[in-house]
Image (cartoon, rainbow, N blue to C red):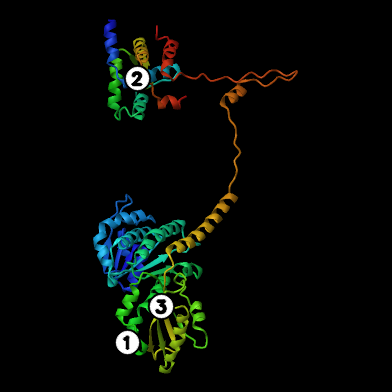
Amino acid sequence: MSIGIGGAGSKLASLLDHGNATIVNVSEIELSKVEASNKILAVTHSSRGQFKGSGRNPEVGKTAFVSISDELYSLVKGNTVFSSTGGGTGNGISSIILKKIAEADSVHLLDRTMFGLLLPYVNRESSEFVENTIQFLLDPVSSAIDSGNTGNMVLFSNKLKFEARIAEADYNHMMIRSLQNFLDIPYKGESLQLLDGHIDHEDFNVYKSKPYFNHFTQFFYDTNRPFGDQLRENFNQLLLPPERSIEAMFLLEVPHIEQAPMLYNILDYFAEDDVTPAYGVVHNPNIEQPTVTVSLLYSRKPRELVDDFKQMADKLTRKKIKKSIEQFVKLEATPFDIQSEVKQMTTPPPVQEGEAPIPPPEVEKVAATEGNDVFSVLKRLRKLK
Amino acid sequence: MEKLFEQQVKRLQEHHFLILYWAALAEDKGLRYNITNAFDDLKFQGVTRTKQTAVAYIEALDVLNFIELKDESNRKNIYITEYGAEALAMLVSHKNFKTRKSGYLEVSR
């Protein structure tokens, strides 16, 4: 089962589970927009009400978590959680889940949670999203990874969406299709004729429960070219690029049984990097070309990820500052001394020879307003003896 | 008699003081200060929200002969009397109350 937290996370979970997901939000309106079998409304104490969401403020999500803490924490065990890292609800609630996971003594392999995290694209999305993401990666993600209590973390990126101008709904489908390709590995091993190796559901679940970042991709495999080159060319554009892999898994589907030995080229590639992947080779007569689905587990520390984000955010901030400096209009300070101004107004200008002097302007009689001047007012009115 | 006057002045409250003060200022500026102006100013200062209360304050000052109400152009204008002036002077010298601004006199400045 998948659980979607916040607006973006809910949409992804709903797509993956075809409407049978559990979704969580602080806004009733947001909950009503997404199809799901289980909808959990987290209670906020925000004066903005239960209808408006958390407005990119993770604190709202964190406060709201208290109301659903027990229910949600038991739900995420052994399941997949989707959340954005920039929004208020997803970031806020997921942060606390990750912290709770990190603080747990140990979490059983099958109880570990796989996270699908959607990261913003720095060049196009708001600075609040980026700032929230930096905080999210720096603290909750980092401590959860270090604790070893989480399952795989999949770092989806919005980069391609903005660069290729893809509609959000289509992009969500692309991300879920891509994830589904990875999740289908044990099912294909089960339903298609097995030619070599084997990845059953147990192997797959153990793999998913490892506390690393997971980069998966699928591409047509050409035996005439080095596997490594093809892998690099076909890194999943929907995910952040991977680092050197620590563990790996692949499923090779071949249209003809005699193509099965192609797998040795792939094993050679991983062996050069001291990785012994879990693998399976199946006969799939429905495809025309050999297709490989690869997953790489890497442990790039969130600190480095944060540095990347910070660098990009700093670059953008510098551009903004440059622009604001260009638009800055310097206003000259005008010294203004009221006494000298009054003096100037009441002093007649120097009289030129042969010119009649200009009389000074009449100064308006100012009525007394202070308590002590009441006497003079009353005397002027001749009402006080 | 003087003792009675002192007793009367002692019983005056801030709203009475303000009405006397604003009436004196208005007269000094050559303006006419009527019951409606006094009510508006008292309301603006947060003293009262009803006109009946404002009228009650003014009538009390009238009964004590501290002000004189004159019907002029369909308006009841307030003029401070000599007794009212003495009462105001006494309140000022004893520093019982602080002056406050009249919206009417500010606008008509």
Residue positioned most to the top: B1
Q: Earlier in the sequence, mark 3 or mark 1?
A: 1
Q: Which residue is rendered at x = 58% and y = 49% of the image?
A: A325
Q: Nearer the viewer, residue B52 or B93?
A: B93
Cα distance between the residues tagged 2 and 3: 86 Å
Query: What x and y, as percent, mark residue A381?
Result: 43, 12
* Marks 2 and 3 in Cβ contact (< 8 Å): no
Q: Are marks 3 and 1 on the same chain?
A: yes
Screen quadrant of the C terminus of chain A: top left
Residue holding disc 1: A191
Callout 2 amino acid: Phe
Q: Nearer the viewer, residue A45 or A65?
A: A65
Q: Nearer the viewer, residue A364 or A212?
A: A212
Residue holding disc 2: B97
Callout 1: chain: A
Q: Could you tell me how many numbered marks the image carries?
A: 3
- Residue A248's disc is 3
In this picture, residue A322 sits left or right of residue B24: right
Q: Are marks 2 and 1 on the same chain?
A: no
Question: Element at badge 2?
Answer: loop
Q: Which residue is rendered at x = 57% and y = 24% of the image?
A: A339
Callout 3: chain: A
In this picture, residue A360 sits left or right of residue A235: right
> Is residue A168 something that shows in the picture?
no
Callout 1 amino acid: Ser
Q: Are marks 2 and 3 on the same chain?
A: no
Q: Quadrant of residue A260?
A: bottom left
